[in-house]
Amino acid sequence: MTTPTTSLFLLDHLADDAMTSELARGDLDALRAVADWIETFVVRPHKDLGRPGPVCPFVPGALERNTLWLAPEQLAGQGVPQVVELLNRYQTLFLDTPPTDGDDVDGKVIVVVFTDLPADRAQGLFADALQRLAIPSYGDHGIVFGAFYEGNEGTAIYNGSFHPFTSPVPFVFVRRGVISDWKFFLDNEELLRLWGRRFGESAVSTLAGELRRLPWRAWHD
């Protein structure tokens, strides 16, 4: 498992038998389950989200521009070093896959679907792998990874009782970091520092805009 499949599927491809003829049945079923979850949950509003708009504001634009791909991978019982190696290679694939410049770069994402990974093993495996990847990948390339699996206890930013990261099949997304990611970095000083370095004056303006909407002056008084 040292090389990605490099089989990248748009969601529309999954309904085309000619496009998926070489996929194993289990891989195809897993991709279709993730695609259905994206279309019925991720791109729609939810009453428990705590803010207006879709569950993930990033995904609708990626689907519209055809820059969200699913990629099937089988772990076959392998461990953290192999996951780290595989995701590093998907990072390279992501960086090399058009668009590679312009505004659309920030709107593309590769979803690496681990089609044979039990959900109860995903938590520890993904946590250990992403701990090794998060800082160097973001610092060197501005790349962000995100882990999804059934039972993921991660919560929405605006509602601590809502768990939006519980996908039907374990996967890790690969995307370019965007300025709004600071909300996910608040409890990680190193990532927040790298975010500030990456976005410079725009980072200051973004945080100032958030503070202006909060009644912190009244709290101080």
Image (tube, rainbow, N blue to C red):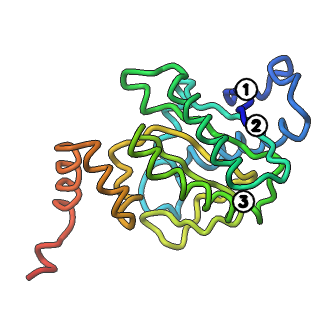
Quadrant hosting residue 173:
top right
- Amino acid type at image mark 1: Ser
Whether the residues at callouts 3 and 2 have beta carbons within 8 Å, the answer is no
Whether the residues at callouts 1 and 2 have beta carbons within 8 Å, the answer is yes
Picture coordinates of residue 67, whole percent (x, y):
55, 27
Residue behind mark 2:
72
Which residue occupies the extreme bottom position in the image?
221
Quadrant hosting residue 7:
top right
Of 180 and 98, the residue lying toward us: 98
Q: Which residue is drawn at 59% across and 47% down?
A: 42
Which residue occupies the extreme top position in the image?
18
Report how far apart the C-alphas of labels 3 and 2 lie in the structure.
15 Å
Picture coordinates of residue 82, whole percent (x, y):
71, 47
Vertical comparison of 38 with 185: above or below: above
Q: Residues within 10 Å of mark 2 (few under 14, many from 20)?
A: many
Vertical comparison of 158 with 34: above or below: below
Residue behind mark 3:
122
Counting residues from the N terminus, which is met first, the one under dot 1 or under dot 3?
Answer: 1
Name the side, left or right, on which 219 lies relative to 24. Answer: left
Picture coordinates of residue 12, whole percent (x, y):
70, 26
Of 179 and 15, the residue lying toward us: 179
Residue behind mark 1:
7
Looking at the rendered structure, the secondary structure element under dot 1 is: loop
Report how far apart the C-alphas of labels 1 and 2 lie in the structure.
7 Å
Looking at the rendered structure, the secondary structure element under dot 3 is: helix
Report how far apart the C-alphas of labels 1 and 3 lie in the structure.
22 Å
Picture coordinates of residue 80, whole percent (x, y):
69, 55
Q: Which residue is drawn at 70% across and 39% down?
A: 35
Looking at the rendered structure, the secondary structure element under dot 2 is: strand
